[in-house]
Image: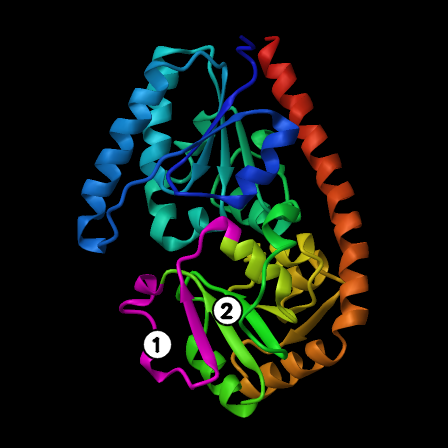
Amino acid sequence: MNKNKGIFIAWIKFQRRAFSMQPFFDFDLNFINTNIKKKKLKILDYLIKAIKTVKTLCFNKDKVIWIQLPPTPLLTILLIYKKIYKNKIIIADCHNGLFNKKWEKYLNKAKSLNKVDLIITHNHVIRDLAIEIGVDSNKLFVLETKPAYKNLKNVENYISKYNSPWILMPCGFAEDEPMSVVFEAARLIPEVTFVISGNKNRAEGIHDLTKAPSNINFTGYLTTEEYEGLFSSADAVLGLTTEHHVQLSVANEATGFEKPMILSDTKLLRELFNKGAVYVETLDSKSMSSGIKEAIRNKIELGKEVKILKEERNQKWENQALTIKKEINKLIVK
């Protein structure tokens, strides 16, 4: 058994970023999940995940352990584990949310995070933000999210029930996704069908989905096969955020599937997705509806641009990943 292979632990049902990283870093994926959905039972949810994590670690033989943050309780467990097994290498793959007010307060000015061996952020904006709050820059690396892998088995035989023109909006129903503006934009272009995927329960207390117009369809939760099939047949993909530092996983998926994009007009998104996209004002329904029509009208040309973008981003990712792999190898031989 190769003890340097590594494992990746994430408290989630599935995470495409980790899945895309796996072939290069050759770690075993450990998605730890529960069926608890109610926010009131979050403590119980975390407790069960913590127990499952400890159980996984008890049988772990790998030297390299990747963790996805947030949530910070996972970090706490691994730091305790590292105190016992000092030769273990802990790598924290830090999603953007770790550095917002909700989670930052648990990092103790980054003192706990700095105890791991390597810290990875998803873009240079988040890297700079991490340094500002005290993250050790010597341990800090940027690894952007790789364009999604398109499983041809999931898309070749998929038959869409939606008639063109229609767009897909993969949604987490988070606070930075302006659903009310999307609804208003949909009203301005009734000839376009909006298909919004994702668990609608997440919208509770954040968005009022009852105000959606008739040309909006909610799919609810989809299996990976259903989701990729749906993605492959869309005319274009809509990705929105009101946060300037968010890179939008949906844009990485659209790049992987070579789909035209309608994205929020932020400096970061323009840098990362500089081809195949129409940029819109996130809180302006007229700008959004106009951008959607433009993307549908020019979908063939934009699709060709995204294909070029995909090649460029894959090469950039390989270079970043190679740098991190070299750092891991240095730690292994210490």
In the picture provided, is 297 more to the left or to the right than 99? right
Which stretch did the figure color magenta? 200-225
**Image location of residue 128, percent across then percent down:** 59, 47
Q: Secondary structure at mark 2?
A: loop
Residue density around tag 1, few if under 14, some if 14–19, many if 20 or more, within 10 Å = some
Disc marking residue 242: 2
Image quadrant of residue 21?
A: top right
Q: Residue at x 58, y 45 (%)?
A: 122
Mark before the other along the chain sequence, 1 or 2? 1
> Which secondary structure, mark 1?
helix
- Report the number of numbered marks: 2
Q: In the rendered view, would you say 72 is above or below 294?
A: above
* Residue 66, image x, y percentages: 49, 28
114 or 275: which is nearer to us? 275
Q: Quadrant of residue 140?
A: top right
* Residue, disc 1: 209
Q: Is residue 220 left or right of residue 287?
A: left
